[in-house]
Image: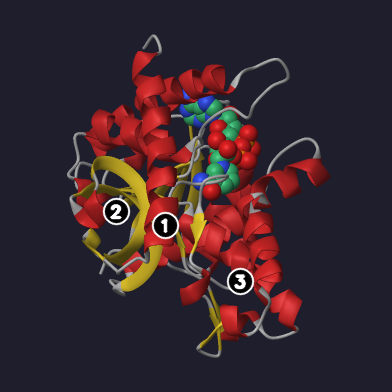
Amino acid sequence: MARNKVSVIGAGNVGATTAQRIAEAGLADVVLVDIVEGLPQGKGLDLAEAAPIVGHDAHVVGSNDYDDTAGSDIVVVTSGLARQPGMSRDDLMAKNAGIVRSVVREAAQRSPDSVLIVVTNPLDAMCHVAFDASGFPRERVLGMAGVLDSARFRTFIAQELGVSVVDTHAFVLGGHGDTMVPLSRYSTVADVPITELLSPKRVRALEERTANGGAEVVALLKTGSAFYAPAASTFEMVDAILRDRQRVLPCAVLLQGEFGLRDLFVGVPAVLGRGGLERVFEIELTPDERAAFERSAAAVRDLVERLAALPA
Ligand SMILES: NC(=O)c1ccc[n+]([C@@H]2O[C@H](COP(=O)([O-])OP(=O)(O)OC[C@H]3O[C@@H](n4cnc5c(N)ncnc54)[C@H](O)[C@@H]3O)[C@@H](O)[C@H]2O)c1
């Protein structure tokens, strides 16, 4: 049986680390693509040379040519620019929209049956760009954010309580970043909701730290943004899809009436399997949770409308 094939577009920090995880797990052959000549080839060769030591048989190659991505089962999109000094959020959004639109067009036509996983920020808006550029059904366009946001929440809960992250679960809804909605009622340690283990003040502090999780790492690194946890999160989605695991993971998906929303990519619990999004895992929300979710969705809608108003 042929091995699975994953193309990772963007051979920067998130892309190369995602490629490493996929290859080292022996999950799929990986094609790393970037616009910079030599960069994906160099990283691809370096990763291939680690294989004898790590002991996996996955092939890793780098390329500047989308023909090498043909027939991929999954295409991960991490290509984009980071915000430069003096660049507004809208400037960044316009630039990254242009990049995501062009790479998705190139990759989608060569892998028409693939599942797209979008990582480039601003995440929810870039999912809309990828959805439009690919022409794929919503089942095959997913955004990575919720897995990362909930991993950060789990980390902070486990640290606060001095328990293993393995026994700590967290539930996050909504857009990526500031407006995400951590559902503390469904966030647990050994099945006990954290609202029964921590004071409301501490719960709020952990929620806020989670919502600012990306900024906290940027402030420390100064010259880049987080990539180990984002790559691990992307890998978890790739694994769930390729192994048809039916995992319930928080992902940005195009809602079609679920949670009372339509035609908007927002983070919700999604069942992931070989077809990509197998179904949205709907849950009841309390009035407060619903209000926070709707605020988050409104922020995403605002972003998408601003994107539509920008010159193409
Ligand atoms: N969704 C999330 O939770 C999450 C988490 C972390 C990072 N991100 C986002 O992921 C993206 C990548 O982050 P990074 O740290 O890897 O950045 P990076 O700068 O290290 O890598 C980006 C790569 O994209 C490449 N690129 C630019 N234009 C291209 C094009 N037209 N075609 C192909 N490649 C192109 C660049 O050459 C670079 O190698 C950023 O937009 C970042 O904000 C999202």
Question: What is the distance, in whole Å, between disc 1 and disc 3 at their CAs?
Answer: 31 Å
Residue sitting at 41 percent across and 21 percent down?
A: 306
Q: Which part of the image, by quadrant, shows the N terminus?
A: bottom left
Identify the mark at residue 154; answer none if there is no mark.
3
Q: Nearer the viewer, residue 53 or 183?
A: 183
Tell me which numbered mark, 1 or 3, is placed earlier along the sequence: 1
Q: Which mark is residue 29?
A: 1
- Element under label 3? helix
Quarter of image, res 279: bottom left
Q: Which residue in the structure is indicated by mark 2?
A: 73
- The reply to whether residue 122 is visible in this rendering is yes
Looking at the rendered image, the disc whose residue lies closer to the viewer, 1 or 3, is 3
Q: Nearer the viewer, mark 2 or mark 1?
A: 2
Front residue of 233/301: it is 301
Say whether residue 262 is left or right of residue 208. Answer: left
Q: CA distance from mark 3 to mark 2?
A: 30 Å
